[in-house]
Amino acid sequence: MKKTMHVTWLGEQRYVAQNETGQQLIIDNSELKLGVGPMESLLAALATCTAYDVVEVMKKRKTPLSHYRIEVEGERAEEHPRRYTTITVRHIAAGAGVTPESLGKAAHLSHEKYCSVAATLNSEIVVEAVLEEQAGVASV
């Protein structure tokens, strides 16, 4: 299954990303931030991906969550490309019958088996840069 995002420059260091059905995300690294930075959006993608899984696993195990949040923190390298060297994902949850053990098992299942963002971060990815000139637009 192929996923596509179109990213359009809005000026400064601000971009709008749009998926095939029109939902948008503002990625912003300008001085006056209107959105999150690209590396923050990566952390958010990991957190929401694992959250989907954990909520579903807990529901299927008959211990649905009444409250749930994730705090995700990434430590970046000092040298460029300043990639994340470690990412800590804290699952903070409550609900009838929810124990640290049951939450831990659900989180482990997500991180090791179900979460596609975590799997992507743990793999070697082929990234291909394709350059195209837009017709009717003056070159730099």
Image (tube, rainbow, N blue to C red):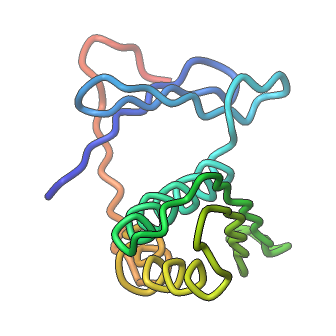
Residue 130 drawn at (x, y percent): 30, 51
Image height of 106 relative to 30, above or below = below
Residue 94 rendering spot, x and y as whole percentages: 67, 62
The tally of labels here is: 0
Quick one: 14 or 115, which is closer to the camera? 115
Say which of 97 and 80 sits in front.
Answer: 97
Residue 72 located left or right of residue 2:
right
Specify whether 134 is left or right of 24. Answer: left
Q: Residue furthest top?
A: 136
Q: Residue at x 37, y 26 (%)?
A: 23
| Residue located 46% across and 61% down the image | 55
The picture places residue 81, in percent across and down from the top left corner, at 68, 67
> What residue is drawn where x is 14% and y is 58%?
1
Q: Is residue 121 left or right of residue 29?
A: left
| Residue that lies at the very extreme toward the left in this rendered image | 1
Q: Residue placed farthest to the front in the image? A: 96
> Residue 136 location in percent, x, y?
27, 11
**Residue at left offset 43%, top offset 84%:** 109
Q: Quadrant of residue 61?
A: bottom left
Residue 68, placed above or below residue 101? above
